[in-house]
Image: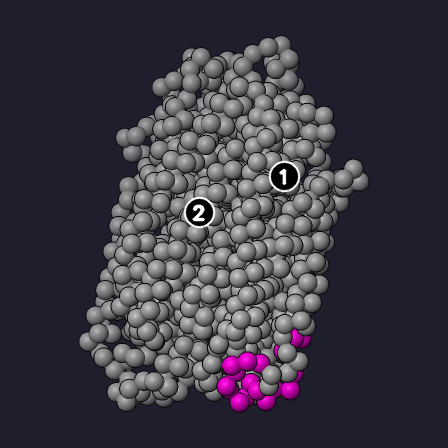
């Protein structure tokens, strides 16, 4: 960073006057209006019809399971929410008021994050049945899509409303001290989001993998078949993982980005830097409402993604225009005119702060658009990459897995380059001053988050559509065009989930980079106030430096990257163990209740829901402790410079790993969808079995480990930010440093050992080790000649001439359609379909 000013930023003299306080009050009011819009959307969704009694019965089972899971999870994480504020009271602060406020707002941040996730999930498990019912009506696709997207809009409004309201309240209460208090608010939101991401991801993918392996692969029955005991748990998991988890994730991104923007803003822009970062997301609230209502399918749309893209880009463009107006109306024309800036280096900058702020925000908005297009290219069903993965299924599951891995690795590079370009572009707006440059990066993040209301809506749209199709499949009451409508919405939902994961990753990187700037600012201030003994212990690092030629710093970099791998491995292993228990349970039910296959006996759905819930909570603590304790261990063992390198390694490795996992999983999922639409032999074919196996591998990739890396990065950055002052202050206290390091390392080691010692469910006494498949004379499973199984469309069937003829035509009497005889033509490769070109190009 040659040529950049690395001097300690002078302490800004922030004094919010009457006009600025009025603006902050307006921000708070707009935030409350977002919650009012959410209430209106709730009423609109709940007013829609719920379909048949059977559909409503299934929906109630999903509602009860999702509610029971979240209640148990909140009880589990309550321990952390109670204990951590007590620890925060022990950390250094400028005043007792600041120390107490940091702890209090940690709890508020956690509660707001939980509320956001719960609210989004609460309506999602009620909107799903209404989407399924709407699909049965005339003009069903438009009605169903509107209900699904506005269901997601509630989660979006809660995300922006509560996040902005919390920040506004802190600024009103603490004024210039608000950034330090907001560290607690952001930490509470981030920690709870990580728990919800990890726990929800373990639940949903344990159920999904277990349901697919036993149902589709072993028993040959379709997805969401009511004979599969894991079906209800699978649908519950979609909501606790993708609705509650993603809403909490993006809420904490919102909160954390505001933390970084306000910390850096007060240093770079003074009083204006404390207010303008609130004005930008306030504009985002207004444009999010416009974007949500702009998502309305039109007759000329090529797919549902066209309507969603339209709403997203309308919101983004209006945001850019309104931010430009706000910047030129509120900010002065020169840095010398900024209120409360005392750093001479900043005052002398020959630049216009209005253009700096506007340019940074526009970079963030453009980044969101670029990530949407890029992720869509790699995960949409009608784009070349997914079609290549689909075609690889002609040679078996191994080539499906290989093609998906290569796609994920390649897409990670392009995504990382786009994010890096955005960060560097924002950094250049600092005109040589590091403090201003890092504030520009934070403002790019707030620019990206002006679209967060629409982004959360897009994400929730996915599980709502998936659940709607599941309810239709289980009830058997949605057929013909209605079933086709739900199939198309589900495919669009897979793409929106992949896109929002990509954008969430981008927000995590920008937030982490901005927090890294806040970490630097805090360390520089602590070094200036450090005692002589602390400076002696720091040696050459007594002035701020992250010199990579120091072995300690290099160790920090390596450990930071390694933690991402360990975290991902723990999350995927947890899914594997939980899924194993689900597989054992579902196999056991098929073995002991042979009447399940001919509908004379009913599976025990609650048993599988309970297994997933219990295992998700049991596996929750280890990844959480890893995220909290590793930065503490590195910081107190090696110092602030290795801790800074640790954060850099985690950010760099985290973005690549998260994109790889997310896009690989998304491509495998949509490759399966393509086959299920009738390509390469359709459902029940060898290609279908291969893509189902690929999808089961991708499930924990895209819905557990990948998404959880986002809050992991931010939690570690916030922990580092909170302990930075203590790491510098106590650098000369060897006994304290050793004691803290030993405790932190010991906690992580014990948690990992306990996790590794958990019993492997496969081969245990819980059930048979072999699937009950094949020609068992009276087992009632596929191949036994019973009426169970699936028809040509993959729909569950009990009996009847039509079903029997369809089954015979599809070859579904055994587990798969036979291979073509010698000389017969193999199924054609998946190619372009007329009228199904993508609405997004890279």
- Look at the image and tell me in which quarter the N terminus lies: bottom right
Residue 600 sits inside the magenta stretch: no
Residue 127, picture quadrant: top right
Where is 244 relative to 626, above or below?
Answer: above
291 above or below 827?
below
Q: Kindly state the secondary structure of the residue where label 1 is placed.
A: helix
Q: Residue at horizontal 72%, vertical 49%?
A: 310
Percent x, y of residue 650:
44, 65
Residue farthest front in this picture: 18
For disc 1, the marked residue is 491
User: Foreground mark, 2 or 1?
Assistant: 2
Q: Is residue 237 left or right of residue 101?
A: right
Instruction: Give how far across and how far down residue 819 sits, in percent.
Output: 62, 29
Measure the alpha-carbon separation of dots 2 and 1.
29 Å
Q: Position of residue 772 (x, y in %)?
A: 41, 23
For the C terminus, which image quadrant?
bottom right
Residue that lies at the very extreme toward the top in this rendered image = 801
Q: Which residue is mark 2?
A: 115
The residue under the point 49% across, 57% down is: 165
Highlighted range, magenta: 338-356
Instruction: In the displayed orientation, state which residue is furthest to the left.
Output: 735
């Amino acid at each position: 960073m040659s040529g950049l000013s690395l001097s300690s930023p002078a302490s800004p003299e922030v004094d919010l006057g009457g006009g600025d306080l009025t603006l902050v009050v307006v921000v708070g009011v707009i935030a409350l209006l977002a919650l009012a819009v959410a209430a209106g959307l709730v009423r609109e969704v709940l007013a829609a019809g719920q379909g048949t009694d059977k559909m409503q019965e299934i929906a109630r089972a999903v509602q009860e399971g999702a509610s029971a899971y979240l209640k148990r999870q909140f009880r589990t994480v309550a321990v952390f929410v109670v204990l951590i504020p007590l620890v925060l009271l022990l950390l250094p602060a400028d005043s007792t008021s600041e120390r107490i406020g940091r702890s209090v707002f940690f709890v508020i941040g956690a509660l707001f994050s939980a509320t956001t996730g719960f609210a989004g999930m609460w309506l999602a498990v009620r909107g799903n049945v209404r989407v399924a019912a709407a699909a049965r009506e005339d003009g069903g696709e438009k009605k169903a899509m509107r209900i699904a997207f506005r269901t997601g809009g509630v989660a979006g409004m809660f995300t922006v409303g509560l996040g902005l309201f919390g920040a506004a309240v802190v600024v009103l209460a603490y004024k210039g001290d608000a950034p330090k208090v907001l560290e607690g608010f952001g930490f509470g939101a981030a920690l709870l989001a990580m728990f919800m991401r990890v726990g929800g991801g373990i639940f949903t993918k344990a159920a999904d993998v277990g349901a697919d392996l036993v149902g589709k692969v072993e028993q040959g029955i379709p997805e969401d078949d009511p004979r599969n005991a894991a079906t209800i748990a699978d649908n519950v998991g979609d909501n606790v993982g993708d609705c509650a988890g993603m809403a909490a994730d993006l809420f904490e991104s919102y909160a954390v980005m505001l933390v970084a923007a306000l910390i850096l803003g007060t240093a770079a822009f003074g009083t204006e830097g404390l207010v303008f970062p609130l004005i930008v997301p306030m504009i985002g609230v207004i444009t999010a409402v416009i974007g949500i209502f702009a998502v309305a399918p039109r007759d000329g749309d090529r797919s549902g993604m066209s309507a969603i893209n339209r709403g997203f880009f309308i919101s983004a463009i209006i945001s850019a225009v309104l931010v430009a107006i706000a910047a030129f109306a509120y900010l002065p024309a020169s840095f010398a005119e900024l209120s409360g800036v005392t750093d001479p280096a900043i005052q002398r900058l020959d630049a216009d702060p209005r253009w700096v702020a506007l340019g940074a925000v526009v970079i963030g908005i453009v980044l969101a658009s670029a990530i949407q297009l890029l992720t869509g290219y790699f995960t949409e069903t009608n784009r070349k990459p997914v079609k290549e993965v689909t075609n690889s299924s002609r040679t078996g599951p191994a080539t499906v897995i290989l093609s998906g891995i290569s796609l994920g690795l390649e897409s990670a590079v392009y995504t990382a380059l786009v994010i890096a370009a955005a960060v560097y572009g924002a950094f250049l707006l600092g005109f040589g001053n590091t403090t201003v440059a890092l504030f520009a990066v934070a403002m790019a993040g707030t620019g990206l988050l002006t679209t967060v209301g629409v982004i959360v809506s897009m994400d929730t749209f996915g599980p709502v559509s998936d659940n709607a199709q599941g309810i239709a499949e289980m009830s058997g009451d949605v057929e013909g065009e209605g079933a086709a409508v739900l199939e198309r919405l589900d495919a669009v939902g897979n793409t929106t989930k992949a896109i929002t994961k990509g954008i969430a990753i981008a927000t995590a990187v920008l937030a982490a980079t901005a927090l890294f700037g806040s970490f630097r600012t805090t360390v520089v201030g602590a070094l200036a106030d450090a005692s002589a003994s602390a400076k002696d212990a720091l040696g050459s690092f007594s002035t701020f430096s992250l010199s990579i030629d120091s072995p300690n710093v290099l160790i920090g970099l390596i450990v930071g990257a390694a933690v991402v791998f360990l975290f991902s491995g723990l999350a995927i292993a947890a899914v594997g163990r939980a899924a194993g228990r689900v597989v054992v349970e579902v196999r056991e039910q098929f073995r002991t209740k042979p009447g399940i296959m001919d509908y004379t006996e009913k599976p025990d759905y609650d048993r599988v829901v309970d297994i997933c819930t219990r295992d998700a909570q049991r596996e929750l603590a280890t990844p959480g402790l890893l995220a909290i304790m590793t930065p503490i261990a590195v910081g107190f063992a090696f110092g602030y410079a290795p801790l800074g390198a640790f954060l850099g390694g985690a950010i760099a490795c985290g973005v690549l790993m998260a994109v790889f996992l997310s896009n690989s999983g998304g491509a495998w999922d949509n490759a399966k969808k393509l086959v299920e639409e009738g390509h390469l032999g359709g459902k029940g074919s060898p290609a279908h079995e291969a893509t189902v196996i690929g999808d089961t591998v991708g499930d924990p990739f895209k819905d557990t480990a990948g998404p959880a890396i986002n809050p992991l990065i931010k939690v570690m950055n916030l922990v580092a930010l909170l302990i930075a002052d203590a790491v510098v202050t106590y650098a000369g206290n060897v006994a304290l440093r050793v004691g803290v390091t030993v405790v932190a390392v010991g906690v992580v080691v014990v948690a990992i050992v306990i996790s590794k010692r958990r019993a492997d469910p496969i081969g245990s006494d819980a059930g048979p080790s072999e699937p009950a498949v094949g020609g068992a004379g009276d087992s009632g499973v596929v191949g036994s000649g019973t009426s169970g199984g699936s028809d040509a469309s993959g729909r569950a069937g009990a009996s009847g001439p039509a079903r029997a003829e369809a089954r015979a035509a599809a070859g579904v009497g055994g587990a798969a359609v036979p291979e073509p005889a010698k000389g017969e033509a193999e199924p054609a490769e998946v190619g372009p379909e007329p009228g199904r070109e993508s609405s997004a190009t890279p």
